[in-house]
Structure formats: C-alpha cells, structure tokens
Amino acid sequence: MVSTPKAPKAPDPTQTAAAQTATNVDTAIANAGLSHTNQYTPDGSLEYKVSGYQTMKDQTGKTYQLPTYSAYQTYSPENQAIYDQTQQTQLGLARLANDQTGKISGILGTNVDLSAGNVDKYVNNHWQSGFNNQWDRDQASLDQSLADKGISMGSAAYDNAMRDFSTRKQAASDQYLGDMYSNAQNAILTERNQPLNEISALMSGSQVHQPSYVNTPTTQLPNVDQAGLINDNFNQKMGLYDRQVAQSNAAMGGLFGLGGTLLGGWAKSDRRLKEDIKRVGTLDNGLPVYAYRYKDGGPMQLGLMSDDVRKIHPDAVFEHEDGFDRVFYGRAVA
C-alpha cells in the first residue's frame, strides 16, 4: 500500500518554555539598554554604565548573564566648585555643633528646676537688686523732701510719710515679684533650651543634600511570542500532515480500486505511454506510486510504472506484442 506520512512531533513544553524565556531575557536586556539614556545638560551629566552581572537559570538549567547598571552623576565644573564649597561649610557647621554638644552634655542629664525657691533665687540674682536700688533712691529723695519741708525724723508727719512709703513699696514689690516670677520661669527655660536650639540650627545647616535624578523616558520592545510561534509552526506541520494523509488515503483507495479491477488482468503500465507523470507515494514494498495521464487521452490516474515493477516483481511484467509493457497489479502490490 502507499506509505503513511509521519505525524510531526509535538513541541516539548519544557523546550518551548525555555525558548520563550530566552526570548524574554533578550528583550528585557534590550529594553534595559534602551531605557538607560545618558543625559548631558549645562549643569552636569547623568550616565549609565554596566557595573556587573546577575546570574539566572531557567527551568532547563540554562544560565543567563543579566547586566546590572549603575548611574553616575557628574556636575559641571562650576557646579562642582559650588558643591565642594557648600560641603566644606556644612562640614564646619557639623563640627561646631558636635563641639557644642560636648559642652552641654551635662545639661541634658539635669532636670529643669522650676521650684518656687529656685525661681525666687533667680529673681533675686538677676533683678531684685535693681528693684531695691530704685526704691532706695526713692526713699532718699523722700527724706530730703521731708527735711526741706522742716519735717524732722520721729515726728508724726514723718512717721506717716514713711508708713505710706512702706505701703507703696510693699505693693510694688508684690506686683514686681509676681511679674518677675513668670519672667524668671521663661528665662530659666530659655537658658536651658538655648544651647540645644543653637545645635539644632547648626545641624540643619549641615544636612547633606542628595543629588536629584532626572526621570528618563523608557523604550519598551514588545516580547516575541516564541511559544506561540512554535505552536503555530507545529499546527502548520499538522495541517500539511493532514493533507498528506488525505492524499495518501486517496492514492491508496485509487490504487486498491485499480488493483481490484485488474486483479485478473494486465494493465498498460509502460512509462512511454504516459504523460504528466508525478510521484505521489510509495508502496510498503518500495514501489513508487504515480499520478499520470495516458497520452491517448483520459483523466488523471494512479498507478505503477513497469520499469519500477520489473526491479521488484519481474514476474508481474511482460512485454506486449505492441512493444509496450503490461503489469499484473495483483502480483505487483503483493
């Protein structure tokens, strides 16, 4: 019979996945290279360079080397000079703040004393002497005024004047101490916080300024559907296989029909009697099967050539008296 076409081998899922992975890796590497666009401006430049590789293995064990990039920012000469000077200034401020921190280390370990006794002491040390001096001058002025008026010490008028002066002084002292008490509390807190505020100000001026990076446009290459292409190729081969099977079945049916019709007789199978000859298959015994027309007319037919049959089954061929070979299909296809 006519040989049956072989079905194409189905794609191996692991190999298909590996092929898709390889395509994806190549696309990713290309996209990374396209996305890392170097930038050059009057203020400086930004460059991307391959700084190393990462190793990746797929499910088949194949190894890929994936490049890793580093970004390098460079200032223009003018900006670099400004940056260096700024860094030196900020470093100096940071060192000064560090020195100040050492000087006030004891303050941080001591609680703020806002007790009445400490506040009174602060008032006495800072403002009480000024208050007393003012009232001492006022009393001296009063004594002189009374003397000028002829009011002598020990007289009733003198005692009344002194009593009135003492009352006014006490009232002023009470008012003064009340006002100064609140001021003293604020002053104590200010003295405690002042060194800390100075250090904070120094440190805020010594902060490192991070360089700013520019967002670069990204260019993405589409991934090639390698798995889809492999499956499409397989489907195309399957389609071709199906057509070949159909042709083979048609050839087998035609040949068997011819063999059955001529089983008891001989058929004209001399190549010289035929035209439009095209090989369409092979019998299991190795004989080629052809499609052809007889030169004297008629439709396309399927059959054998006597010269081929003579090589395998010489007993199935004889030369007719007209000089052309005949083939006994019952023997030839056996």
Image: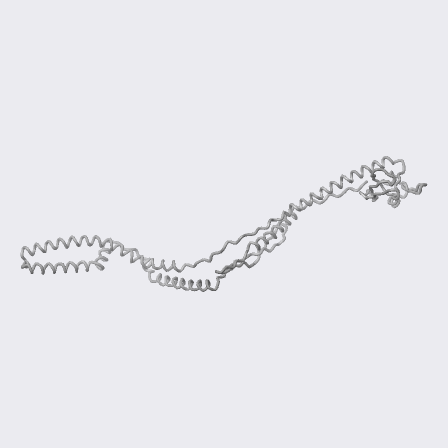
Residue 294: image x %, image y %?
86, 40
Residue 39: image x %, image y %?
52, 58
In what quadrant of the picture does the C terminus appear? top right
Residue 172: image x %, image y %?
17, 54
Q: Closer to the camera, 58 or 296?
A: 296
Structure colour scheme: one colour
Residue 126: image x %, image y %?
22, 59
Query: Is residue 147 placed above or below 13 in the rendered structure?
Result: below
Query: Is residue 167 placed above or below 303 in the rendered structure?
Result: below
Residue at position x 72%, y 41% in the image: 239
Q: Is residue 24 left or right of residue 74?
A: right
Q: Closer to the camera, 124 or 73?
A: 73
Q: Is residue 311 left or right of residue 106?
A: right
How many callouts does the rendering have?
A: 0
The part of the image, by quadrant, that contains residue 162 is bottom left
Q: In this view, does 241 lie to the left or right of 51?
A: right
Which residue appears farthest toward the right when viewing the image? 321
In what quadrant of the picture does the N terminus appear? top right
The part of the image, by quadrant, that contains residue 64 is bottom right
Query: Is residue 88 placed above or below 300 in the rendered structure?
Result: below
Q: In this view, does 14 lie to the left or right of 97?
A: right
Which residue appears farthest toward the front when viewing the image? 42
